[in-house]
Amino acid sequence: MTRPTMSRRVAILLMASLLATSWACTLAPVGATDSRSSEGISVVISKEVWTSSETFEATIGLWGLNMGRAYSFEWEIRTGNGSMDPGVMVQNGHQNFTANSSAMQVQIEANHLDSSITHLHRLLAVLSDNNGILTDSQANFSSFTNTLPVAYSDIIFFGDSLSDMGNSFNQWGTPDSPPYWNGRYSNGEVWAEQFGEFMGTTMSAGRGSANGNNRAYGGAHSGSGTYLFVIPNVGQQVDDYLQNHQINANELVVIFCGGNDFVHSDETNTQQVVDNIEGHITDLTSDGATEFLILDLPPLETVPRVTEERDAEGVAAMHERILDFNQKLHNMLDITENSTSLTIHRGMAWDMFDTVYNNPSHFGLTNITHPACEHDGYTCEDDDQIAPNAEEYLWFDKMHPTSTMHDLTDFYIRELMGVDDVDGDDIADIYDNCTDTLPGIETGSDGCDIPPPDTDQDGIVDAEDICPETDFGLPVNQHGCAENQIDDDQDGVMNDLDQCPNTQPGWEVNSIGCSEWELDGDDDGIVDAEDDCPSTNLGDDIDGDGCADNQLDSDNDGVTDDLDACPNTPREELVNVIGCSSSQLDDDADGVYNIDDVCPNTPFGEVDVNANGCGPSERDSDEDGINDDMDQCPDTEWLAETNDDGCAANQRDTDGDGRKDSVDGCPLIWGSLNGCPILSIELGLAEAPDSETRTANISVLISCESNCQMNWILQEGELIVSEGMGAVNGTYYQSYTNLQVESQQLRARVSIDGMWKDTVMTVYFPPFENSSETSENLTGTPVNGDDGPSDSAGELDSSFEMDQSSIAMIAMLLLFNVGVVAAIMAVRSKSRLQNDGREQAMADFESELFSDPSPAIAPPTIPESTTTLAIENVPEKTVQTAVSDLPNFGDLLD
């Protein structure tokens, strides 16, 4: 859609008028009316101060009209006050009408009235007839250019009561509130807080070391120190702030002061006040300030206090003094800005105030000389009378302006410091390609109107488009609908697909919009409504009902006869795509029809398929969970536990020793004794104990016929002297010290998987010095255990002699010991039989070993070991061993 034309905009502006046209001439001066006329005209506006982003509105009242008489109404908006020149006409309009009543109203709207020429504007309205001007009227108003804020990290204000946001009130309760507003020296917000908030800064009062970016204080002078000992002058305000804060480069510093110097203190040295301000700029610059807004002074001779207290000469002197100050101030600012990198903005308070003072009606003011608050002093108190129309006054008290003047100051400073956005679309004019956008119109990033939406881009805006989702590029009718969105015969098929566009109402149609009474789909000469086979191929033979052979199904299996490989399928049997049922098919080609085939996916070529159609890879004859083709033991007993090869314990020999696992005492270890290996253990005294250390070096010789890993242990009673885990065939050494007795029996055992062999040996130690018995050179005597002959640690001294009675006694003791040991071993053997069947089996295996020492299968080859495993490294010594003629106790018992 295109942007609205100018004529459309004027039509919006003149809501009650005809299309506007321009004229070259200007309206006649107001007051040049025809005295013979009874007609009247008035101009009413809702307010006097506007911004360029607002729509200016006025109501023109016409009365005393003659019914049926032709009139011409004209209006125009001009700049200026009309006192010196007619100004520039910025907008106008006219309307010709014939009166049908004695009175009427005309609404006028205008947009984008800015201050590019002047803030002053006036609306002129003239009523005429064919004979000339009948009456006229005008209304004065002002307009400011709308601006956008500039981003500052903070804005800091220094000054006096014209900018004070409550610092004086917060410290001294001055001025009284009410009648003053929230501690401000006015009846509303002061310009400083309005401007700061517009710029996006959070404003707060602050003094001394406290926070707060508004440091202005009522009564402050431009110099340093304090006024009347308590009021911080601007120099003191700057010092206090800089002692507690650092000014950043992106902060704006505002200084507005000097009025109290001239009014309160009657300062005549204008240069001194300028020097004071220059000093503040220098101090602030040294602390980091780079951008300033400095305001000059308004015409203070208009202040009620000055006009009341001074004669005409004094008022004139004040006028000249302020002019001199402002000139010197601007000279100083020019020099400072040219000699530094500072940015200094000038607030022309004199020009602004003078414009308002001399054109009050343009700003809604009716009283510019007297304060709205009736009071004899300079400021008002809470019981003073306030004018009911205080917003129409320039002064609130004898020194301070009303909130109306503060509002105007805020507008003026916004224009100075902001970025122009005349049409108020939030797009700065420097980036706005359409600076005349009307209020409320949505704009794009370029500032131009966003045209009414046309979602489907068919040229018909959505508001008028009956078909808002038309496919892109399709031609549409005046309602925005394409052929694929229209169904003229209302048969449910859109026109673009309807090959029968004139279908009768109520007929059912196909996907192309045709009913059976309109189609002969197979061109067989029979319309579809009467054709039993409406899809006969062209040229096929048909019978009377329009069907060809390829449309018949003799066995009613759902496959036409021309495609049916099994034309005689029994009724109600399910068939495949070629008309064959499971009773007619053998999908896996195993010789068993699908209907009887329990395994319908037998691999092709597999032999030995049974009557159920299952091959070896699909059946498990012994039901052990392993299919026959993988089962190495296909005749496993039912419910027997098997391994991954399908074999039970009575079918496998895991350790390969010739005995099935079910009767193998050690199914995982090769052994010749009923499946278990033969173990042996011997204790020897590798080094006899001496009298000094009383330490013996014990040798432990262990062996397993299949070189299996064994565990062995050496004990002194219940105390473990040493042990080895996972040991292999070899001799192991262990030091043994005994400082308490002269002899000690040690027991050793070797074991694997619940079976063991053990042996004992007595170690003799040198006698203690106070011993009554003499046993020199007696080192140790091994005692027969379960597994082999006893060992001796050395030979007895050849000089040792005994009498016959002693020898007999020793022989009896030996026989007694043999009996005791035999009894103990018998009890142990009986206990093992009762508590551990496996241990009993071991005893049986050893007995069998003595009766049949040859295993059925040769034991595995035991690699020769060239290393000796030792628990403790001891020097090798030649050990003399005495071999007893007695048989081994273990051999006897086992």
Image (spheres, grey):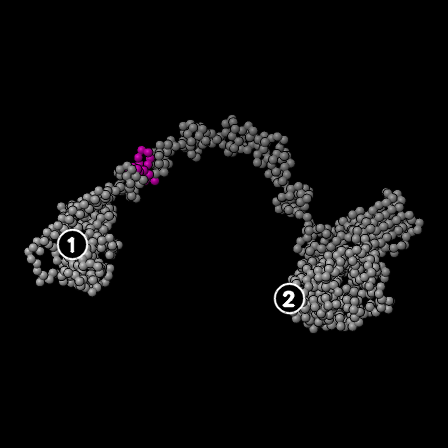
Q: Is residue 311 left or right of residue 203?
A: right
User: Does the segment drawn in magenta span residue 471?
Assistant: no
Under mark 1, the amino acid is Val
The quadrant holding residue 427 is bottom right
Relative height, residue 772 to residue 576 (above, below): below
Return the residue nearer the eye: 538 or 605. Answer: 605
Query: Over which residues does the magenta segment extend?
Result: 603-623
| Residue at horizontal 32 percent and vertical 38 percent from the top | 619
The residue that label 1 is drawn on is 783
Residue for point 64% across, 39% down: 486
| Amino acid of disc 2 | Asn
Choose between 10 and 780: the one closer to the eye.
780
Residue lying farthest to the right in this orientation: 36
Q: Is residue 778 visible?
A: no
Residue 214 locus on image (x, y percent):
69, 62
Provide the residue designation for mark 2.
Answer: 244
Q: Nearer the viewer, mark 2 or mark 1?
A: 1
Q: On the picture, is 795 further left or further right than 354?
A: left
Residue 346 picture location, percent across and down: 74, 66
Label 2: how many Cα within 10 Å (few below 14, some 14–19, many 20+): few
10 Å crowding of disc 1: few (<14), some (14-19), many (20+) = many
